[in-house]
Structures are given as structure tokens and as C-alpha cells.
Image (cartoon, grey):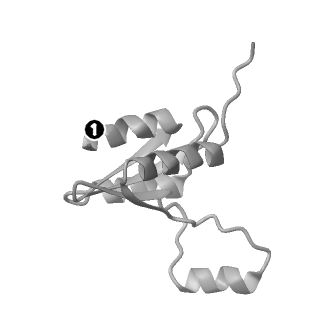
Amino acid sequence: MKKIIPTEHEECVVLSQYLNLKGIKHTHINNEMWTTSWKQKMKAKSEGVSKGVPDYFIIIKNKPLFIEMKREKGGVVSEYQKEWIEAINKCSGIKAYICKGFEAAKKIIDKYL
């Protein structure tokens, strides 16, 4: 029997539900806003929207962390995302992770709890 691999969106929904259940402050950074409007794209870019910023900003016990979510199997990390993760991890007191699926993200979050 072939295992069904959840989409990145489905993994993100479960992660957000888990964070809400635990009462953890978080936000999804919606850089992948889809629109055909060049006006909206240019407006977002002029306001500083940047490719590769991790999907989630989370605060646990006064400690910030970023999580870039990918599918459990098949998700590809872009060069922009790698650059952001590396830059964040050079900062003092903050960490960024790439997580392949909800279970990987949950393990990271649970270490902070």
C-alpha cells in the first residue's frame, strides 16, 4: 500500500493547530502570496517582502525561532531559503530550522517546551 504524503499546506495546518493547542505565540509569514496583479507584487516588494524567509516565527519561553516547513518527502529548499536559515543561525539567541513534515517540527518545538 502506497503511503500518502501530506502537502506542505496540510503539514502547516497541523503545525498551526498544534501551536494553538499549546498556547504558543506564532505567525505564518505569508511570502508566497499568489496574485496575478503586478501592482500588488510591486507593492509587496517595495514594502520589503523577501524571497526565502522561513514560514513560521515562533516564540517559546521568550526564545524566538523560525521554522521553514517542507513536505515530509519531496519538498525542496531553495537557495534563498538556505541563505535566510544560515543568516538567522548566525544571530545570537535565535535559531532557524528546516523541518520535513509536522513530526519534525513538533520534535524541535517540544525541545523548547
**Front one among 73 and 14:** 14
**Front one among 6 and 95:** 6
Q: Is residue 5 above or below residue 97?
A: above
Picture quarter containing residue 39? bottom right
Q: Furthest residue to the top?
A: 1
79 relative position to 87: left or right: right
Secondary structure at numbered mark 1: helix
Q: Quadrant of the C terminus?
A: top left
Q: Furthest residue to the left?
A: 92
Q: Is residue 102 above or below residue 43?
A: above
83 relative position to 100: left or right: left
Residue depicted at 57% across the width and 33% down the height:
72
**Front one among 19 and 85:** 19
Which residue is under mark 1? 111
Place of residue 68 in the rendered image (x, y in percent of width and height, measured from the top left): 48, 50
Three-letter amino acid code of the residue under disc 1? Lys
Place of residue 13 in the rendered image (x, y in percent of width and height, measured from the top left): 58, 49
Place of residue 22 in the rendered image (x, y in percent of width and height, measured from the top left): 37, 47
Q: Quadrant of the N terminus?
A: top right
Residue depicted at 51% across the width and 64% down the height:
29
Place of residue 92 in the rendered image (x, y in percent of width and height, measured from the top left): 19, 59
39 relative position to 75: left or right: right
Tag 1: Cα neighbours inside 10 Å, few (<14), some, or many (≥20)? few
Residue depicted at 52% across the width and 71% down the height:
50
**Front one among 17 and 96:** 17
Picture quarter containing residue 40? bottom right
